[in-house]
Image (cartoon, rainbow, N blue to C red):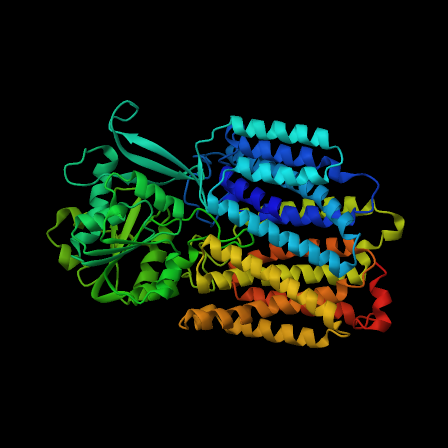
C-alpha cells in the first residue's frame, strides 16, 4: 500500500498526464498484485526483480523532464484541461496527430508496464506470505499492513518530505524481505544517489509539488530587484505573489493584475469579505487595500499559505484583520454560519484529483450548483459575489454563466480581464450594465453578449465534472482504458496459462469468479464512500486519509465478526447489503449536511460505512476456507482492477450510479453461488470452496 500511494503521488506530479489519469497506476498495481498472488507457488522468484523494476520506475519519474515526457501530447476531446499538460503541442496535421497519439500511448503503456512489473513482484511475495497463515488471519495481517502504509504516507504528506525520503523509507523496508541483500542495497543506494543528484529545489505539500521562483523588476535580469514570486504546482503555472500596493514598482505582470484584483471593489464597498481559494494572498491583500474590516481567507493547501505568509510582498496574512482557515472551501460553507458583504472565489484550479481511486478533481465540488447555493446563504442582504476563472473554452464560459444565474437567480455580469486569461463573473445589486454605464474600461470588458448558448449540463454534487463538456467518457479516457484493458487481458492470459495444469481452470472456477465479482463491487463501494465523505467533511488530505483508514478498519471489523461468530449463511448479509446500497442511492450526502458535526459523523459514517462492513463479511465468509489463499486473493484484486475501470461510468451516469453498479455486481456474485452445484456457504458445502 505504501509503495502504491507514493508511486501514484510522484507520477501525477512529475508526468502531468497522470494527474488526470491518476487511477491508471492504481489499476496497474491491482493487476500486478493480483497476478503476483496467482504466481505465489511458481518456482521462479519474481520478487527478485522488484529492486530493478521499482528503481527503473523511480528513475523514469525522477528524470521525466530530461526524457521529455513531463508534458505529453494528449488527445483531449471533450475534457478541458487547464494547464500546459500538452506542452504547447499543436495538432496541425494528420502526421502530427498520429505522432502525438503514438507518443502518448507509448509512454502510457511503458509506465503502465513498469508499474505492473513492480507490483507483480510484490504480489508474489504477498501471496507467499499469506500462505503461511490461515486465510482470514493472513487477510487481517494484510489489512493491518495496508493501514500502516496509509498512515505512513499520511505522515510524510503532513511533514512535507520529498520523494527522496519517501523511497528511502520504502527501500529500507524492502531490504528486509530481499533475497540478495547486498545486491539490493547496492541498486537501491545507486537509485537514491541518482535521485538526490537531480533538482532538489521543489517543495512538497500534501497536494502538490511546488516550485517558487522570484520575479525580477527587469525581466531576464536576475540581479534586478525582486518584485514578486511565481508559484508553479506540478510543473504548471498556478499563481503569483505580487505587490499591487500604491507606489509599488510597475512591471508587466502587475499592470495586468492590478485592474483584475481591484475589479470586485468597483461594485462593492465591503466591510466583511470572504475569500475562498485564497492561495498565497493576492485577493486578501486586495481586500485590505480597499479598507475591509475583516477578511476570512480559506485555503486548502497549508504550504501555499505558509509561502504566502513568508514571501508575499504585501504581507496580507500578517494583518490582524485577516482570519486564516486552512480547509476545503466546500467544507467551510457547511461549517460556517457567518455572512459577508463580498465573497471572492479566487482563481481556483486544483490541477489534481480528489483521490487516486476517483475521477473527480479536488475542486469539482466547489463549482456545483449545490455549492454555489450554499455560498449564497453566506451573503448579507445586498451582498456581492465575484467568481473568476481562467477559461479557454467557450462552452465552460457558458456553464459558469448558467450555473451562477440558477444559483443566485440573477444574470451575472461577465467581464473579460487581461490577467491570466481570466473571466470575472459578478452577481449583486450593482453587477449590471446600468451601473457601469459611462465607465468605458468596464463597458469594453463586458462579454455577456458573446456567451454562447450551448446548454451543456450543469455540475451538481452527483455529476460534479466541471471540466467535462457532456455526460460521456472522453475519447482520451475510453481509448486509453481500452488499450490498457486489452494489454492487461493478454498479459493476464499469458501469466495464468503458465500455471501448472492442475490450476488451469483459474478462469473457470466459480469460487474465483465469485471473488473477482466481490473485488469489482467493493472497489465501487470504496470510491463512492470517499466521494460522499468528502462532500460531508471536506476534500482535504486529512479527510481522505481518515476515510481510507476507516474503510480498512471496517474491513477488519468484518473479519473479526466472521472469525468470532462464524456465520453459516450469507443470505442475510446479501439482503442487508442490498438495502444499504439502495438507501445510499436515494439518500444523498447533502441530506445530512445541516446536522451538527457529531450527529453527521454518526449517521454519515453508518450509512456510508455499512456497505463496506457487509461487503467485508461476504468476502471474509468466502475467504476463510479457501485452500489456495494467494490465488483467491489474486482473483479479488483483479476484480478490483475492473471496478476501477467501471468507476469511469460515473462520468456518464453520476456518482450515485456507482451504488447501482456495485449492487448489480454483488447480485451477479450471488447468482454464481446459486448456480447448479453451488449452494450457500454452509459446513456441508465448504469443501467446494477449497477446490480452487
* Quadrant of res 468: bottom left
Q: Nearer the viewer, residue 475 or 596?
A: 596
> The C terminus lies in which quarter of the figure?
bottom right
* Quadrant of res 232: top left
Residue 649 seen anywhere in this rendered image of the structure? no
Residue 652 seen anywhere in this rendered image of the structure? yes
Q: Residue furthest left?
A: 438
Residue at 67% of width from left, 28% of height from top? Answer: 186
Q: Relative to 680, does residue 489 appear above or below in the rendering?
A: above
Residue at 61% of width from left, 64% of height from top? Answer: 554
> Is 67 on the left or on the right of 413, as rendered?
right
Q: Position of residue 255 (x, y in %)?
A: 21, 37
> Is 352 on the left or on the right of 320, as rendered?
right
Q: Nearer the viewer, residue 594 or 448?
A: 594
Q: Relative to 18, does residue 199 appear above or below in the rendering?
A: above
Residue at 26% of width from left, 48% of height from top? Answer: 283
Amino acid at each position: 500500500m505504501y509503495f502504491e500511494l507514493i508511486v501514484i503521488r510522484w507520477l501525477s506530479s512529475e508526468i502531468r498526464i497522470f494527474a488526470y489519469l491518476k487511477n491508471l497506476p492504481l489499476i496497474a498495481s491491482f493487476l500486478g498484485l493480483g497476478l503476483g498472488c496467482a504466481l505465489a507457488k511458481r518456482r521462479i522468484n519474481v520478487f527478485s526483480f522488484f529492486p530493478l523494476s521499482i528503481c527503473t520506475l523511480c528513475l523514469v519519474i525522477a528524470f521525466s523532464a530530461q526524457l521529455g515526457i513531463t508534458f505529453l501530447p494528449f488527445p483531449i476531446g471533450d475534457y478541458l484541461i487547464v494547464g500546459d499538460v500538452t506542452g504547447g503541442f499543436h495538432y496541425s496535421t494528420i502526421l502530427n496527430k498520429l505522432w502525438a497519439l503514438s507518443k502518448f500511448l507509448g509512454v502510457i503503456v511503458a509506465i503502465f508496464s513498469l508499474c505492473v512489473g513492480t507490483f507483480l513482484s510484490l504480489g508474489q511475495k504477498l501471496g507467499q506470505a499469506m500462505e503461511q497463515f490461515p486465510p482470514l488471519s493472513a487477510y487481517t495481517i494484510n489489512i493491518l499492513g495496508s493501514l500502516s502504509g496509509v498512515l505512513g504516507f499520511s505522515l510524510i504528506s503532513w511533514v512535507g518530505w520529498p520523494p527522496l525520503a519517501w523511497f528511502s523509507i520504502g527501500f529500507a523496508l524492502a531490504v528486509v524481505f530481499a533475497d540478495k541483500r547486498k545486491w539490493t542495497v547496492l541498486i537501491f543506494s545507486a537509485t537514491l544517489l541518482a535521485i538526490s543528484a537531480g533538482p532538489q529545489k521543489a517543495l512538497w505539500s500534501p497536494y502538490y509539488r511546488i516550485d517558487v521562483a522570484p520575479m525580477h523588476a527587469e525581466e531576464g535580469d536576475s540581479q534586478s530587484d525582486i518584485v514578486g514570486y511565481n508559484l508553479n504546482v506540478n510543473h504548471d503555472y498556478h499563481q503569483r505573489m505580487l505587490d499591487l500596493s500604491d507606489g509599488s514598482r510597475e512591471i508587466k505582470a502587475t499592470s495586468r493584475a492590478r485592474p483584475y484584483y481591484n475589479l470586485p471593489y468597483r461594485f462593492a464597498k465591503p466591510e466583511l469579505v470572504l475569500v475562498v481559494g485564497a492561495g498565497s494572498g493576492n485577493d486578501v491583500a486586495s481586500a485590505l487595500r480597499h479598507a475591509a474590516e475583516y477578511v476570512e481567507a480559506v485555503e486548502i493547501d497549508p504550504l501555499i499559505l505558509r509561502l504566502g505568509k513568508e514571501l508575499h510582498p504585501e504581507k496580507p496574512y500578517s494583518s490582524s484583520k485577516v482570519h486564516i482557515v486552512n480547509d476545503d472551501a466546500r467544507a467551510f460553507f457547511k461549517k460556517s454560519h457567518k455572512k459577508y458583504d463580498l465573497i471572492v472565489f479566487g482563481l481556483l484550479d486544483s490541477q489534481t484529483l480528489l483521490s487516486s481511486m476517483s475521477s473527480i478533481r479536488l475542486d469539482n465540488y466547489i463549482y456545483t450548483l449545490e455549492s454555489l447555493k450554499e455560498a449564497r446563504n453566506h451573503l448579507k442582504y445586498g451582498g456581492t459575489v465575484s467568481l473568476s476563472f481562467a477559461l479557454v473554452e467557450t462552452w465552460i464560459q457558458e456553464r459558469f454563466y448558467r450555473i451562477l444565474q440558477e444559483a443566485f437567480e440573477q444574470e451575472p455580469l461577465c467581464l473579460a480581464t487581461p490577467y491570466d486569461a481570466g473571466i470575472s463573473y459578478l452577481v449583486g445589486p450593482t453587477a449590471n450594465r446600468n451601473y457601469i454605464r459611462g465607465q468605458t474600461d468596464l463597458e469594453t470588458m463586458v462579454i455577456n453578449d458573446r456567451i454562447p448558448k450551448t446548454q451543456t449540463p450543469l455540475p451538481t454534487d452527483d455529476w460534479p465534472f466541471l471540466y467535462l463538456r457532456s455526460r460521456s467518457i472522453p475519447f482520451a479516457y475510453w481509448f486509453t482504458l481500452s488499450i490498457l484493458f486489452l494489454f492487461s487481458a493478454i498479459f493476464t492470459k499469458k501469466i495464468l496459462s503458465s500455471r501448472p495444469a492442475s490450476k488451469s481452470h483459474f478462469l473457470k472456477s466459480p469460487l474465483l469468479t465469485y471473488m473477482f465479482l466481490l473485488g469489482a463491487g467493493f472497489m465501487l463501494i470504496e470510491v463512492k464512500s470517499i466521494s460522499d465523505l468528502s462532500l460531508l467533511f471536506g476534500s482535504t488530505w486529512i479527510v481522505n486519509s481518515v476515510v481510507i483508514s476507516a474503510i480498512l478498519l471496517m474491513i477488519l471489523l468484518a473479519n473479526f465478526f466472521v472469525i468470532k461468530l462464524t456465520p453459516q449463511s450469507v443470505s442475510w448479509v446479501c439482503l442487508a447489503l442490498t438495502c444499504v446500497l439502495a438507501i445510499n442511492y436515494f439518500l444523498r450526502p447533502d441530506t445530512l449536511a445541516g446536522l451538527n458535526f457529531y450527529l453527521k459523523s454518526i449517521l454519515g459514517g453508518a450509512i456510508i460505512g455499512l456497505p463496506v462492513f457487509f461487503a467485508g463479511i461476504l468476502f471474509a465468509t468466502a475467504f476463510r476456507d479457501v485452500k489456495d489463499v494467494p490465488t483467491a486473493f489474486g482473483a479479488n484484486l483483479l476484480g478490483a482492477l475492473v471496478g476501477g475501470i467501471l468507476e469511469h461510468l460515473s462520468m456518464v451516469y453520476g456518482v450515485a450510479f456507482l451504488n447501482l453498479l456495485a449492487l448489480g455486481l454483488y447480485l451477479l456474485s450471488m447468482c454464481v453461488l446459486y448456480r447448479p452445484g453451488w449452494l450457500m456457504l454452509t459446513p456441508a458445502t465448504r469443501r467446494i470452496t477449497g477446490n480452487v
